Amino acid sequence: MRTQVGIVGAGPAGLLLAHLLHLRGIESVVIESRSRPYIENRIRAGLLEQGTVDTLTESGVADRLHREGLAHDGMELRFDGRSHRIDLHGLTGKRVTIYGQQEVVKDLVAARLGYGAPLHFEVEDTQVHDPESDRPRISWTKDGQRHELLCDVIAGCDGFHGVCRAAIPEGKLKVYERVYPFAWLGILAETPPPSHELIYARHADGFALATMRSPTLSRLYVQCPVEDAAENWSDDRIWDALHKRLARADGLDQVKEGPILQKGVTAMRSFVVEPMRFGRMFLCGDAAHIVPPTGAKGMNLAVADVRTLCRALVAFYRGQGTALMDSYSATCLRRIWKKQRFSWWMTSMLHRFDGDDPFEHRIQVAELDYVCGSQAAQRTLAENYVGLPYEDGVAA
């Protein structure tokens, strides 16, 4: 087979890149090791920055997002029982939208299959070949038959554990990593969310987050030990922790208990590789970077990578040279490190690192008190939370 861009991975990054290229007349083939039901039902992040919503809207795949997504103009910080609302829209003119990553994937899969572009699920033994040449190749096995794809460019959108980054020779990438000494226990519960906006809570027992997937489905998290397992948390223990950590000084209990549909433990890490390019292979999304979920930046960073790569490939195929391809990594990394800084800051401010250290607790409370009492600090938080401007000249 022959195409212009070979895309490994049918997550949000790979599917969005394929869709944006299609709109600009550039051919691509997408391959994915998982099944279609798996990628369309895998529960992941659910908060979209303004720029992500705008990107999906402009590319014609956001009709359902606008019908079913929950737009938020603010978010809440809670500590020592005190609550403070950050007016995201008032401070920035932008908002965020709750719409699950799996829903974005469904919309992009439907669009691609709708116009008949190649999308291959359940492939095995994927390998990339000659990425440093101007004719890189991707090979895989499907139903016992070996396939090979010749292309001009490979986009590695296959996640943290994918084959693309692993195919880059040792010594060609510099890795930056921080593993946090705690994790998140997350649940999906059939109950109305505690609030119509997100609540980020700092408690002496540890962090808690209240978000949602719909008016009747809550997504709730509590900080837990990194070595913990979901089986160690009974439903009663989970609800007790949420009642306590999300408690308000006025005694109002916003946590409404209900059937827990899913539960799981998520490790917390920061991870970046530099550069995000090796020859004609470009890394996008989780293949190149991971952020702790506190800042809600994972999928949004992947969208920014894809916008940058799409712009570079359009210039290349229009005969405008390789300058934007050559600057792809540096352009993406400027944004990535800013988002890493924001995610690290939110994580550091809201989590318990050492429960026996009262100094740490007082510093975190002082930081939160300062943010909630300073409009300048709130604007800084809000600007980062709703999404920084893209570097392609289009406002986010």
Image (cartoon, rainbow, N blue to C red):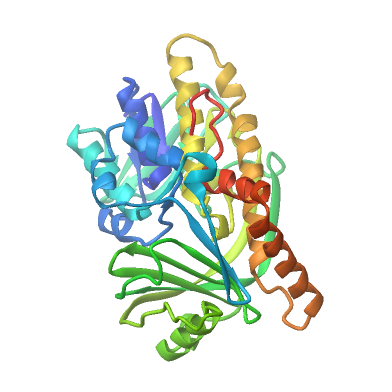
**Vertical comparison of 12 with 228: above or below:** above
Residue 346: which quarter of the image? bottom right
In percent of width and height, residue 247 lies at 52, 80
Q: Could you tell me if residue 335 is visible in this image? A: yes
The residue located at (64%, 67%) in the rendering is: 350
Quadrant containing the N terminus is: top left
In percent of width and height, residue 153 lies at 47, 27
In percent of width and height, residue 75 lies at 49, 58
**Vertical comparison of 234 with 288: above or below:** below
Q: Nearer the viewer, residue 126 or 225?
A: 225
Q: Nearer the viewer, residue 28 or 180?
A: 180
Residue 359: which quarter of the image? bottom right
Does residue 89 appear to the left or right of 344 in the view shown?
left
Does residue 37 appear to the left or right of 341 in the view shown?
left
The residue located at (40%, 56%) in the rendering is: 46
**Extreme-front residue of the structure:** 250
